[in-house]
């Protein structure tokens, strides 16, 4: 879920051309889970091979990122490590909700209600250890590095950006801003429209600059984290119920002392606060990251990619070959353009 800062942070559109030649740190669990949720069959079930093994994650990773690679982008995939203590309750809550939805799916299936089946199935996605291992194999075969975070992937991705080993974090969540990433890129998708309750909205890549956020909202980094805590994060999902982004900003600007901010928010909140806001604050500020990571890119191992996609999981070899050739052609053209600059 993450913290929802979408309505108050300044952002600007950015083109794929602008991102060409840039290295982006990907919050892997975020993007893979997105594929598991969205790449589905008509009845809502995920893509599978003939052995019943889910392949939605492989399809999403391969087709989206070979397309983006053909536009000149490079990616570092960062994977989550040990879950912070405060996040355990949220993970259990998510699992409970999935079990409830699964029961609704089975009921809809009995009645043959395909629309409801599709709706419920999307909310039952689970990312398994096997899927993670398969994803890492494919990423490596595509010549991109994997980085294992000691804890939160977005925190490690933010650190990689702060070290200037990547241009920005690529994620739909905003947590990397709270972890201090200088830049966040969103909507890095091949789709051009997103379905909403009332029609469709156009999707365009956007970039959010941390300095612009803090300047626009007139907040320090710690105050930005406090804002997130008031609204709700993965470590305190409901936040201070009844305190929205606007009210949260008002409280922070009226009270500089964090203790007083939380006290005032608690008076307004419509539900009892059952978390320690200072423990959440310290979790964000002291989340473990590692300096011992390697960012090495290599050529695509076409043979290994085809083995994973076609031999192991029965994807059509013609489509896989076409996507790989597209990347090769684009890279060849980019090299030629680079050489011409010196002529």
Image (tube, grey):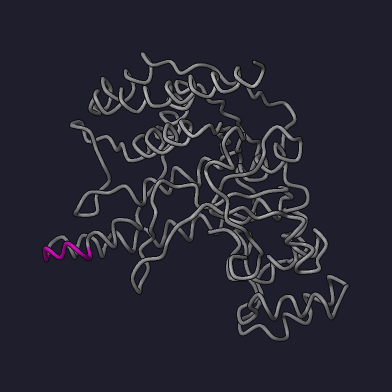
Horizontal arrangement in the rendering, residue 245 relative to residue 61 (left or right)? right
Viewer-closest of 148 and 324:
324
Q: Write down the quadrant of residue 25 in the picture.
A: top right
Q: Residue at x 42, y 22 (%)?
A: 329
Q: Residue at x 34, y 54 (%)?
A: 124
Q: Is residue 68 magenta?
A: no
The vertical placement of 203 against 72, above or below, is: below
Residue stretch in magenta: 111-116
Horizontal arrangement in the rendering, residue 31 relative to residue 3 (left or right)? left
Q: Residue at x 62, y 58 (%)?
A: 12
Specify the quadrant that holds the C terminus.
top right
Q: Main secondary structure of the magenta part?
A: helix
**Picture coordinates of residue 47, whole percent (x, y):** 26, 41
Q: Is residue 114 magenta?
A: yes
In this figure, what is the number of numbered marks? 0
Horizontal arrangement in the rendering, residue 275 relative to residue 262 (left or right)? left
**Picture coordinates of residue 44, whole percent (x, y):** 24, 54
**Picture coordinates of residue 250, whole percent (x, y):** 76, 80
The vertical placement of 87 against 339, above or below, is: below
The vertical placement of 22 against 192, above or below, is: above
**Picture coordinates of residue 180, whole percent (x, y):** 74, 50
């Amino acid at each position: 879920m993450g913290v929802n800062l979408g309505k108050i942070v300044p952002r600007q559109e950015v083109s794929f051309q602008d991102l060409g030649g840039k290295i982006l740190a990907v919050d892997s669990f975020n993007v893979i889970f997105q594929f598991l949720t969205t790449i589905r069959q008509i009845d809502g079930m995920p893509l599978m091979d003939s052995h019943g093994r889910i392949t939605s994650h492989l399809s999403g990773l391969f087709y989206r990122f070979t397309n983006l690679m053909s536009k000149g982008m490079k990616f570092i995939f960062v994977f989550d490590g040990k879950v912070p203590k405060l996040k355990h309750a949220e993970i259990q809550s998510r699992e409970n909700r999935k079990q409830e939805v699964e029961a609704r799916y089975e009921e809809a299936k009995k009645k043959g209600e395909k629309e409801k089946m599709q709706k419920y199935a999307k909310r039952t996605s689970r990312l398994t250890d096997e899927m993670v291992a398969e994803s890492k194999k494919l990423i490596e075969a595509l010549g991109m590095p994997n980085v294992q975070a000691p804890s939160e992937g977005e925190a490690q991705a933010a650190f990689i950006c702060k070290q200037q080993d990547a241009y920005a974090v690529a994620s739909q969540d905003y947590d990397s801003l709270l972890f201090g990433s200088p830049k966040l890129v969103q909507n890095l998708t091949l789709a051009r429209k997103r379905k909403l309750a009332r029609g469709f909205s156009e999707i365009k890549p956007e970039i959010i600059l941390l300095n612009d956020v803090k300047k626009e909202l007139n907040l320090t980094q710690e105050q930005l984290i406090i804002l997130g805590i008031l609204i709700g994060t993965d470590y305190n999902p409901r936040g201070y119920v009844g305190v929205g982004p606007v009210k949260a900003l008002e409280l922070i600007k009226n009270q500089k002392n964090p203790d007083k901010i939380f006290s005032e928010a608690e008076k307004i909140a419509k539900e009892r606060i059952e978390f320690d806001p200072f423990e959440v604050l310290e979790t964000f500020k002291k989340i473990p990251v590692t300096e011992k990571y390697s960012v090495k890119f290599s050529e695509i191992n076409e043979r290994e990619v085809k083995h994973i996609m076609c031999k192991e999981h029965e994807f059509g070899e013609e489509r896989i070959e076409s996507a790989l050739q597209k990347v090769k052609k684009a890279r060849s053209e980019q090299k030629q353009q680079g050489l011409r600059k010196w002529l």
